[in-house]
């Protein structure tokens, strides 16, 4: 895997990346475990002035490049919340969320078939496809596929600028739905609208270990300790990488499952992981490897 | 394995309380659960043991120890 490199837009085989491009929207202002499975019903509808900080900001998302004073504030922020906050709480609220990429990140509210409710996060990967954790679209102890998921792109508290889309069409892989394998904890929500053409969507890529370790990774989602309605961001270097999981010390909390884990390159944002797990030893994402990449590509086409 | 919590206030089930797993053995899914009309919220975890679950209401939070396979009844 580590030595496999391809360009999606090319037939050449000796390249350094495999990527699908991001899109900023039009708003002006494998193995058996990877077999795709789906829900049977269809969608109903519904740097500041100092150069060191500047350099750090450039490694992070563009937001900090634009607002380096916020980066300083981020570094100084503290909180009483502990556990999967590793060290101090360095999460930073995104407000407003009406610019890209924040508006392409979605608050998710899931209702299971057993009548329970959950909060998660997803991210637009195409005009009508949201990528998230497998455990946000398939609940082993709660009747499997949920009754519905309300998808709220760029939610900001009580503001749902881009509306609430009620979805009932879901995808995951057998590695998750049958085997509950943490390595294949990922899935998709297929919308009946093309909201991604408005809010934009993330690119995605699979990369080798050394590339991933060299990058500052960004993560933004909707943590439950903040009410699950506001978007919070943090970025860090990777802690470790294995064949299917990326581990980091990015501060996260319950509700951020499904968040994009992305890097910024030449102004484009590429997800390379899907946040799924918390742990005191490091939070982690399902790594986008070729099999995951291929499924995301197929699911993206379903919503296009 | 499940972590189950039933939330009551003066004996009446309370909906709309958000819960997250704050710590526990191994790693856990970073989903947040919200209590339903019956006051119930639960988490599906892979590792048996005792987890710390933090509950959030509008004005405060509480930290509970919850053991897999057992239901904790919590009075707000």
Image (cartoon, rainbow, N blue to C red):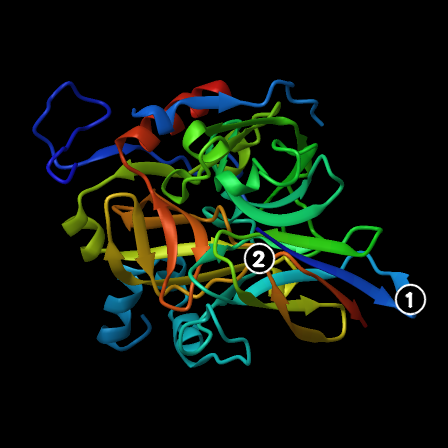
Q: Nearer the viewer, residue B54 or B69?
A: B69
The dot on residue A96 is 2
The dot on residue A272 is none
Q: Are marks 1 and 2 in contact (CB under 8 Å)?
A: no
Instruction: Look at the numbered disc 1 and give the secondary structure of its residue.
Output: loop
To which residue does mark 1 refer?
Answer: B11
Chain letter for mark 2: A
Q: Which residue is rendered at x = 27% and y = 68% of the image?
A: A56
Q: Which residue is rendered at x = 52% and y = 64% of the image?
A: B49
Q: Which residue is rendered at x = 10% and y = 37% of the image?
A: A3
The answer to whether residue A166 is above or below residue A261 is above
Chain letter for mark 1: B
Q: Can residue A63 be seen in this view?
A: yes
Q: Which residue is rendered at x = 75% and y = 68% of the image?
A: B57
Task: Please state which of the two labelled residues, at mark 1 or mark 2, is closer to the viewer.
Answer: 1
In the rendered image, residue A304, in percent from the top left (x then y), is placed at 48, 20
Q: Quick one: which residue is furthest to the left in this view?
A: A14
Which image quarter: residue A223?
bottom right
Q: Nearer the viewer, residue A211 or A193?
A: A211
What's the CA distance linking mark 1 and mark 2?
40 Å
Within 10 Å of disc 2 (Cα), the crowding (few <14, some 14-19, many 20+) is: some
Instruction: Give the side of residue B34 with respect to residue A13, left or right.
Output: right
Instruction: Give the side of residue B7 with respect to residue A50, left or right.
Output: right
């Amino acid at each position: 895997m580590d030595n496999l490199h391809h360009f999606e837009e090319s037939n050449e085989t000796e390249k350094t990346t495999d990527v699908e491009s991001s899109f900023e929207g039009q708003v002006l202002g494998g193995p058996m475990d990877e077999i795709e499975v789906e829900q049977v019903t269809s969608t109903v509808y519904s740097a500041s002035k100092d150069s060191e900080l500047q350099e750090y900001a450039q490694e992070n998302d563009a937001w900090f490049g634009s607002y380096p004073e916020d980066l300083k504030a981020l570094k100084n922020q503290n909180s009483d919340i502990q556990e999967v906050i590793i060290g101090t709480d360095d999460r930073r609220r995104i407000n407003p969320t009406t610019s890209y990429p924040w508006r392409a990140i979605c608050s998710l509210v899931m209702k299971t078939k057993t009548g329970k409710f959950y909060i998660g996060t997803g991210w637009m990967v195409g005009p009508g496809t949201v990528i998230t954790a497998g455990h946000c679209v398939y609940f082993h102890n709660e009747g499997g596929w949920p009754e519905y998921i309300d998808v709220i792109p760029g939610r900001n508290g009580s503001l749902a600028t881009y509306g609430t889309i009620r979805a009932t069409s879901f995808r995951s892989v057998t590695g998750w739905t049958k085997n509950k394998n943490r390595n294949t904890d990922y899935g998709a929500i297929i919308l009946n609208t093309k909201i991604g053409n408005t809010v934009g969507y993330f690119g995605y890529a699979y990369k080798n270990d050394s590339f991933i370790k060299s990058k500052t990774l960004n993560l933004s989602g909707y943590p439950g300790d903040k009410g699950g309605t506001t978007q919070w961001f943090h970025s860090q270097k990777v802690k470790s990488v294995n064949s299917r999981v990326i581990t980091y010390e990015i501060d996260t909390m319950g509700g951020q499952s499904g968040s994009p884990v992305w890097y910024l390159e030449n102004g484009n944002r590429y997800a390379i992981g899907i946040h799924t797990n918390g742990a005191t030893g490091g939070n982690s994402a399902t790594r986008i490897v070729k099999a995951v990449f291929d499924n995301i590509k197929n699911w993206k086409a379903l919503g296009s | 394995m499940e972590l189950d919590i039933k939330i009551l206030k003066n004996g009446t089930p309370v909906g709309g309380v958000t819960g997250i797993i704050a710590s526990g053995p191994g790693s856990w899914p970073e989903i947040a659960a919200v209590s339903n009309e019956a006051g119930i919220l639960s988490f599906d975890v892979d590792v048996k043991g005792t987890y710390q679950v933090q509950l959030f209401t509008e004005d405060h939070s509480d930290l509970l120890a919850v053991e897999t396979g057992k239901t904790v009844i919590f009075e707000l």
